[in-house]
């Protein structure tokens, strides 16, 4: 058996690497940290397949505050994550999200806006005339309004953020090992070690589940039912000969979303719950684009009648079937087994706040910067779902 490590993190994606970085950067934390990552190419995790979007337009205060911290973090990223004074570039592109609403969605748009503004989010409400004036290429005939992020929203390269956390963590002394975790060892309501596929095991005082879409498997090794499932989502990249200027990240009332990506566009749409099976393959459903997404795109932006599909990929959400929100912190009975899972479609932007939060819990036994206790594992047991209205 290898020497005891104080913290063992299963999964070195953006969440596991953010936790490793924040823990090691906390001066009051004195232990060692090992990250077990089975896929050193990082090709198959959620992170590398993410759209990389960062928005403040949520309805749950903690979700808003986590993204606000991301903005703060991005503003200092080279100072915080730079190694040997090399600047860190995650290709952050600041541009607002525009949530479009039909008449019946206006009350929700207003109530979300009230929460957002009370927390200092720079967001504006637009009526149909504003939309028609601001976006002359858009069909607004069935729209009653929209909510536009005026600053502090945009998108970045998710893989680069993952690697920046990882490289900085390694430079501070975190060990990454390229192996697969296959089981847990326990004793008296404590996890004592993580078993690896090569037959060895790694002991730890704290074990953190940061395994993304595979989180339920790791939980199951301890007999814990974690309602987080791997669910497939697509990104379709297309070009259009007509120039569409000033396009924000657009969320159509149908749920179809798109954003400019260089000279092209990316589009996607989450399926309805009854068409969203657990799924681990990466096959792309081109029919979903042709039959569902494209007609909605062409309705909203008539120039998109004539587009060329250029590329597409599939990735997996770690989908929390209870409420599509994060599960954070220790298990109520196995108190050295920590969870950072279930982020569904918004984990990339929560990674700095989650890394900081788990580091605080482990170092000080409590949240210090931002109270995220609403996301604790307890609600998986009580069924007390968090009602976030702005899920994409
Ligand atoms: C198509 C798509 C678009 C998205 N768009 C956005 C967006 O715009 N904004 C946003 O905030 N979020 C978005 N997300 C969600 C976001 O990408 C995820 O929430 C985030 O990347 C989760 O990071 P993670 O570290 O938890 O998971 P992952 O990146 O999946 O990392 C988990 C790691 O654990 C490793 N692992 C698993 N099991 C084991 C094991 N047994 N042993 C060793 N290692 C193991 C895996 O190899 C993997 O590298 C999107 C996701 C997808 C799929």
Image (cartoon, rainbow, N blue to C red):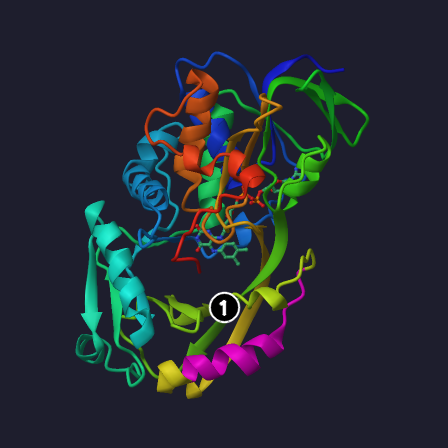
Q: Position of residue 257 (x, y in %)?
A: 42, 68
Question: Is residue 292 magenta-colored?
Answer: yes
In the image, taking residue 96 as reference, residue 211 lies left or right, namely right
Which one is nearer the viewer's eye here, 26 or 63?
63
Question: Is residue 258 magenta-colored?
Answer: no
**Whether residue 208 is situated above or below residue 242 in the rendered picture:** above
Which one is nearer the viewer's eye here, 287 or 332?
332
Determine the image quadrant of residue 108. Answer: bottom left
Which one is nearer the viewer's eye here, 178 or 147?
147
Q: Position of residue 102 (x, y in %)?
A: 32, 76
Which one is nearer the viewer's eye here, 359 or 254?
254
Q: Position of residue 215 (x, y in %)?
A: 63, 41
**Whether residue 260 is situated above or below residue 219 in the rendered picture:** below
Q: Position of residue 101 (x, y in %)?
A: 32, 72
What residue is rendered at 31% in x and 80% in y? 243
The answer, for residue 102, to whether it is visible in the render is no
Quadrant where the N terminus is found in the figure: top right
How packed is label 1: few (under 14 Cα within 10 Å), some, or many (20 or more)?
A: many
In the image, taking residue 173 as reference, residue 241 lies left or right, namely left
Report the span colored magenta.
282-298
What residue is rendered at 52% in x and 74% in y? 310
The answer, for residue 2, to whether it is visible in the render is yes
Quadrant where the C terminus is found in the figure: bottom left
In the image, taking residue 116 as reference, residue 67 lies left or right, namely right
Element type where label 1 sits in the image: loop
The residue identified by callout 1 is 269
């Amino acid at each position: 058996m290898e020497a005891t490590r104080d913290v063992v993190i299963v999964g070195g994606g953006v969440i596991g690497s953010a936790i490793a970085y924040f823990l090691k950067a906390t001066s009051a934390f004195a232990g060692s940290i090992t990250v077990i990552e089975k896929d050193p190419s990082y090709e198959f995790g959620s992170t590398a397949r993410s759209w990389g979007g960062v928005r403040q337009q949520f309805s749950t205060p903690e979700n808003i505050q986590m993204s606000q911290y991301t903005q703060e973090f991005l503003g200092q990223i080279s100072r915080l994550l730079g190694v040997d004074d090399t600047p860190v570039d995650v290709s952050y592109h600041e541009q607002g999200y525009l949530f479009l609403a039909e008449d019946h969605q206006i009350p929700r748009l207003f109530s979300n806006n009230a929460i957002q503004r009370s927390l200092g989010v720079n967001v504006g409400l637009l009526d149909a005339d504003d939309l028609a004036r601001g976006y002359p290429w858009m069909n607004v005939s069935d729209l009653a309004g929209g909510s536009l992020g005026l600053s502090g929203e945009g998108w970045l390269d998710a893989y680069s953020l993952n690697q920046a956390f990882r490289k900085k963590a390694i430079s501070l002394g975190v060990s990454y090992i390229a192996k697969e975790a296959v089981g847990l060892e326990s004793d008296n309501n404590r996890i004592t070690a993580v078993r690896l596929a090569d037959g060895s095991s790694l002991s730890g005082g704290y074990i953190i589940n940061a395994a993304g879409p595979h989180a339920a498997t790791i939980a199951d090794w301890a007999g814990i039912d974690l309602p987080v499932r791997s669910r497939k989502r697509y990104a379709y990249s297309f070009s259009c000969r007509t120039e569409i200027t000033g396009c924000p990240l657009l969320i159509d009332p149908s749920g179809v979303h798109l954003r400019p990506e260089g000279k092209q566009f990316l589009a996607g749409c989450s399926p309805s719950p009854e068409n969203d099976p657990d799924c681990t393959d990466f096959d792309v459903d081109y029919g979903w684009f042709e039959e569902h997404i494209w007609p909605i795109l062409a309705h909203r932006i008539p120039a998109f009648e004539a587009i060329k599909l250029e590329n597409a990929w599939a990735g997996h959400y770690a989908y929390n079937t209870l409420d599509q929100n994060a599960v954070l912190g220790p298990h109520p009975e196995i108190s050295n087994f920590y969870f950072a899972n279930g982020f569904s479609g918004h984990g990339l932007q929560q990674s700095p706040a989650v890394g900081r939060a788990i580091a605080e819990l482990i170092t000080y036994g409590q949240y210090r910067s931002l109270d995220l206790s609403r996301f604790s594992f307890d609600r998986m047991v009580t069924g007390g779902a968090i009602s976030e209205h702005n899920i994409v």
